[in-house]
Amino acid sequence: MTELDKARNIINATDREMAKLFEQRMDAVRMVAHYKKEHGLPVDDLGREADIIAKNSEIVENDDYRSYYVDFLRNNIEVSKRYQHRLLDGMRVAYSGVVGAFANIAAEKIFPDATCIGYPDFAAAYNAALSGECDCALLPVENSFNGDVGKVLDLAFFGALYINGVYEAEIVQNLLGPKGSTIEDIEQVISHPQALGQCAQYIEKHGFEPVEAVNTAVAAKVVAESGRKNLAAIGSEEAAEKFGLVKLEGRINESGNNTTRFAVFSRNHRDFAANDKHFIMLFTVNNTAGSLGRAVSVIGEHGFNLRALKSRPTKDLNWEYYFYAEGDGNLGTFEGKAMLADLSSCCSSVKIIASYEKEIKI
């Protein structure tokens, strides 16, 4: 047997073992895809991919081989992702609005393989995920210009869904008119109240009369169907394309840093992970003096930083409130578990609805 024959026998035997390991790996990939579908998680996880490449490439001892092994790992990741995309093709994502609305645009960016389904309002989208009609719901929780989306926070408090991802999307508002119109023709502008608020200075400057609509895409549809050259919508370029409008002027929102934070709600709670760095919790405090102050102190005493604390009426009794808190830290640690246990002394209820590594810009 020649040296070439020996080498080929080693390669053939290695390839047979690698084929078995490949099948084992793809079985695990199928499990990952199933988990992501149940928890409303996207296929892409760039942080996890970088971590795999960094850690696994160190296993290779031969420096001459390492760069080739990195290529091998990257190819494995791409194959795995292609398989996950195929498995998630039937995923259904609920959002509030119609095609062309900012929520629709965000949903399609986060879940490019899914069927994204618009619902008339936040509650309908939330309930679609709750009932199993959809696998998850993408809903806005906060806008950098207009603040909290109170109706969604209430759904989170009173409902049974969990947040398994937080995404930040830039919101660019544009003046959209019917074909053949100019800015000089416009007398009224129609859009969602938040969009009108984001563009208040622009509207006032031009003397437009604001008119409220359910959402920005519906506003674009109204303009398209009205046949009026003096009516314009405020919304996305995608809405203009969808409804055959023209962009009369772009980026008309008052703040150049206008973003909306979207949360993915699903029926299943994502397990605490070692790399989690943020959490969202909802709690109510005992009706005794100093309970709220004590709750905040407990969180700090265990080394957790509160980034946001917001109160909302419970609606069950007058002047009773629940608190929405966002914090930094990992609740799966010893200190996290101890902090949650200590909160029971001053809180009548504590609900963890999210634990995640980072917010993702889309």
Image (cartoon, helix red, strand yellow):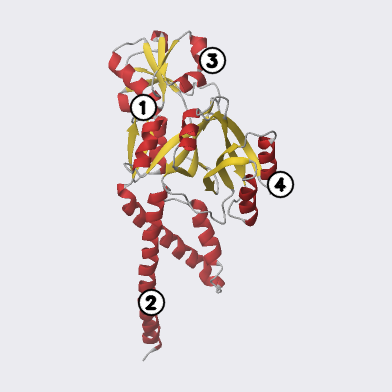
Q: Is residue 86 left or right of residue 167?
A: left
Horizontally, is 224 left or right of 43 in the view?
left
Dot 3 corresponds to which residue?
201
Q: Secondary structure at mark 3?
A: helix
Instruction: Give yes or no for contact between labels 2 and 1 (Cβ–Cβ under 8 Å).
Output: no
- The structure residue drawn at horizontal position 40% and vertical position 24%, both measured from the top left corner, is 216
> Mark 2 vs mark 1: which is more N-terminal?
2
Tell me if label 3 and label 4 are in contact, CB under 8 Å: no
Q: Which mark is residue 301?
A: 4
- The mark found on residue 17 in the picture is 2
Residue that appears at 48% across and 22% down: 194
Give the image location of residue 139, x and y in percent.
Answer: 44, 35
Number of residues whose C-alpha sits closer than 10 Å to that of mark 1, classed few (under 14), some (14–19) or many (20 or more): many
> Which element carries disc 4, helix, strand or loop?
helix
Q: Label 1: which residue?
A: 239
Name above or below for residue 347 compared with residue 195.
Answer: below
Instruction: Decide: is 314 above or below 75.
Output: above
Residue type, mark 1 in image: Ala
Q: Tell whether 291 sits left or right of 29.
A: right
**In the rendered structure, which amino acid carries the disc numbered 3?**
Gln
- N-terminal label among 1 and 4: 1
- Above or below, comparing residue 208 to residue 114 in the picture: above
- Mark 1: secondary structure: helix
Provide residue 272's location: percent of width, then percent of height: 53, 54
Sequence order check: which comes first, mark 2 or mark 3? 2
Camera-side residue of 125 and 99: 125
Residue depth check, mark 3 versus mark 4: number of the one nearer the observer: 4
2 vs 4, front mark = 4
Between disc 3 and disc 1, whose residue precedes? 3
Q: What is the C-alpha distance between the residues marked 1 and 4?
A: 48 Å
Residue shown at 48% from the left, 8% from the top: 207
User: CA gap, disc 2 to disc 3?
Assistant: 67 Å
